[in-house]
Structures are given as C-alpha cells and as structure tokens.
Image (tube, rainbow, N blue to C red):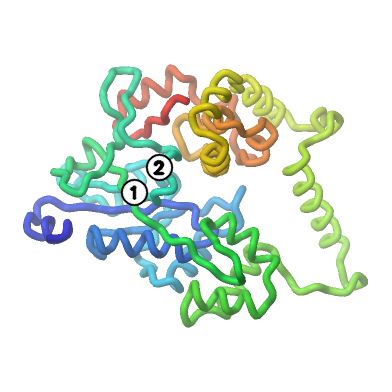
Amino acid sequence: MKLRELFEAAPAKKIVVVMPGGFHPFHPGHKSLYDWAVETFGRDNVYVAATNDTKSRPFPFNVKQALAGFAGVPSNRFIEVKSPFNALSYDNIISDAANTALVFVRSEKDKASHPLPDQVRKSDGNMGYLISYQRNNNLETADTHGYLAYGPTIDFNFSGLAIRSASELRAAWPEMGDEDKLQAANLMYPGNGEEASKMLDTALGIKDAVAAEDVSPEDEDKFHTDLDDLVHKYFGSSSDEEEAMDETEQDNLSIIKSLVDPVAQQSMAASLGTVRLSKAKVRQLQDVKNAQMFDDPKAIIKAALNYGNSVEDVMANLSPELDLTKVKSDTQVATDRAANPFLQVAKDV
C-alpha cells in the first residue's frame, strides 16, 4: 500500500509535501525528484516552492515556473514563497496545521546541507522543528513538527557532459552550440525546446554577437562592470578596492573573518577526506547564497568556512542585501527558536 492510500483511508489526517529549491534553472534532476515525491505522496499533495530572488542568481520566479511547466510540473503546483524552509510560508496551502502533516522533500545529495533534521535546541534541550521522515511514520502535525524526506535524483547527459546540478548546467550552457542547446532543451523540456532555449539564453545573459560599432556606451560599461565582477569573484579585491568598499561590505568582511576557526577546519578536513570535503564545500557555498533566508545567517557562513571555503569565496557568494551587523544575536536566535517551533535549527559545526 502506498503512503497516499493510507491518507485516503484516514481523510482527517492530511499531508502537504513541499519541494523547495533555487531552480536556476529547473532541470531533469529536479523533475526526477518531483516525480519521486508524486509517486511517494500522491500528486494532489505535492508542491514545488521557489523565491523570486535574483540578487545572486539569474532566474526570476516566472521563468522558473515556466521552465518547470515545460518539464511537466503544473503551474498551480509551483508556488512563490519568500522563505522556502519556513513552515509559515505555507499557511495558504496548510489550512489546518493541527490536522495536516508537512513534509519537505530534498535530494539525497543535499543531506549535509542546511537546514538539517533532528537538531536539538540548546535553549531547552528539545528536538527542533524539523525531524527525519520515515516511510512508516505516524506523522505528527505541522503545528508540532515538520519532516525532511530525501529522495533520489538522476544525473543527465547532453552535449557529452554529465550534469548533476543547476550550477553545472549554467556553466555548460554558454559553451554549447545552438544545435546542442536546442537538442538539450528539447530533452529537458519536451515539445518546448525552442522557447526554453531562448529563455535560458536570456536569463544567462547570452546574446547574439554585434559589430563593435553598434555597441552603445551603456552596453560597453555593462560589459566592463560584469568583467570586473567576474575578476573579483575569482581573484578577490586589491587593498585599494577593499578601502573603497562601502561600510556594509567592510563590516561583513570583518564579521566573516572573525568566524574563521582553523581548528574546526582541520577537524572537518580530517573527518571527511579530500573528495567528500570538496563536494561539501560546494554545497556549503550554495547555502551561503541563500543565507538571508535562514534565521541565523552567521551559522550558515561559519559552516561554509569550517568546510574549508575561503573568506573571499564566502564574500563572493553572500547576497549584497545581507548586512551581518543587523542579524540577530545568538541569544536572540535561541530565544526565537524556543518560542517558535517553525524556525529552523542550524547544526553547529
């Protein structure tokens, strides 16, 4: 008997399943996880959730929703939220939290990424809001706990490249020829390849080449700005440029430097080994890009540093809108978590 049949047999006990993510862009790996969630929990119970945040990523919500629709996710099941892992974001689909179970679905490859389940609150010694989902669970309701379920995803191959993530897709796309792009888009978004290919080109800033004399001063300035940003991302800032940073950037840099813990870095490297550490570092930087969505951004940043990411890498991936001087103190975070079970608990690393 499938889980959805159990819930049909007990209509008073409902379930809402949410697959949150960045989806920059939505690709076959995401679709395979969505299909697993539908098979496991029932199509009518499953939603996909994303933000409209384009500060650090290129895809606005409407493009994410359209590409997911091309892949086979109904548009009314792809919803916009501000904080994907905060249960309060889903009040509109959880009409009765005292009678509804909430399950977040993530990929198995994200098991080491925040938020983590089964974290004990330091403030009171009780279990945090998120706990691990087990197939035979007698599920608690959303006003008590939410669940994290991890499902399988597929790697997909096109243009001779094995793609495992949206970041790898974004890196590969500009290097592909037009025919390869169209073929790949048709594989990812059957029947909508041409339109999807254009949307990907637009979102990733890929345009047809133009003659030098047709380039406007504005476009030339933008080119140099983008190039400068790229150089800074990979090579950092010079001492003169650091002096020219605005006050928020300087404050953020100082706080991030204060979070570096060489002992924790050495311990993490020794426990994980080179290969696992390398993969974990990438995942942690993805968390940094979304740090502003969590109640304790500094814990996200500290974890990324402990996994061996440099201060420069963290700064490059931090949202420019995040001011670390204005985030809550550790004491306030602990107080809020104790008072509100919906707030997530980040694992101390």
Q: Amino acid at mark 2?
A: Lys
Image-quadrant location for residue 261: top right
Left or right position of 191 against 227: left
Left or right position of 72 against 11: right
* Residue 255, x across and y down, in percent: 63, 23
CA neighbours of label 2 inside 10 A, class few (<14), some (14 to 19), many (20+): some
Image point 37% across, 25% down: which residue? 336
Q: Which residue is denoted by mark 1 in the rendering?
A: 150
Looking at this rendering, what residue extends furthest in the left direction?
Answer: 9
Image-quadrant location for residue 234: top right
Image point 53% across, 68% down: which residue? 157
Mark yes or no: residue 285 visible: no
* Residue 180, x across and y down, in percent: 63, 76
Is 15 above or below relative to 172? above
* Residue 287, x across and y down, in percent: 52, 40
Residue 111: which numbered mark, if any? 2
Of label 2 and label 1, which has the lower sequence position? 2
Q: Give the CA distance from mark 2 to mark 1.
A: 7 Å
Image point 48% across, 69% down: which residue? 66
Image-quadrant location for residue 343: top left
Is 54 above or below relative to 233? below
* Residue 284, x across and y down, in percent: 53, 39
In front: 188, or 56?
188
Mark yes or no: residue 2 visible: yes
Dot 2 falls on a residue whose secondary structure is loop
Q: Amino acid at mark 1?
A: Tyr
Left or right position of 105 against 159: left
